[in-house]
Amino acid sequence: MIKESERLKALEKIKTITFKQHARISRAPYFVLAVKDQLETLLENNADKGLLEQGGLTIKTSLDWELQQVAEKQSNRARMTSSGSMGRTISRLLL
């Protein structure tokens, strides 16, 4: 956590910075949007409202991109396996 004095100093510095629009989200979009929603909720009822839209924030999360890719591959593999066996089960029931 940052100290209140550090937060206030950063807010003053932000007033003089020009921000550019960030490129579209290409990696882990659901995770990024979930984090964004949480930040908007945290910032909506205080003096920092609008800070997220200004940009320039560095947000560190617990997402391990390499581990996420492995998990998605395994999930897709499991889904393909279960949908194949599900189809065979349904066709047996229909006979």
Image (cartoon, grey):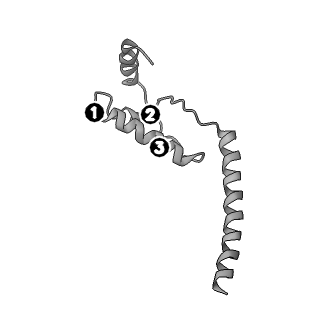
N-terminal of the two: label 2 or label 1?
Answer: 1
**Residue 34, relative to residue 89: is it above or below?**
above
- The residue wearing badge 1 is 45
**Quadrant including the C terminus:** bottom right
- What's the distance in space between the residues labelled 1 and 3, CA to CA? 18 Å
At 53% from the left and 44% from the top, the residue drawn is 31
- The residue wearing badge 3 is 34
Q: Position of residue 32 (x, y in %)?
A: 51, 42
- What's the distance in space between the residues labelled 2 and 1, CA to CA? 18 Å
At 65% from the left and 43% from the top, the residue drawn is 68
Q: Secondary structure at mark 2?
A: loop
**Quadrant including the N terminus:** top left
N-terminal of the two: label 3 or label 2?
Answer: 3
State the residue in front, 51 or 80: 80
Q: Residues within 10 Å of mark 2 (few under 14, many from 20)?
A: some
Q: Position of residue 67 (x, y in %)?
A: 68, 40
At 35% from the left and 38% from the top, the residue drawn is 41
- What's the distance in space between the residues labelled 3 and 2, CA to CA? 17 Å
58 vs 54, left or right, is: right
**Residue 80, relative to residue 22: is it above or below?**
below
Q: Residues within 10 Å of mark 3 (few under 14, many from 20)?
A: few
- The residue wearing badge 2 is 55
Q: Secondary structure at mark 1?
A: loop
Please identify the quarter of the rendering in which residue 36 is found: top left
**Amino acid at pointer 2:** Gly
**Amino acid at pointer 1:** Asn
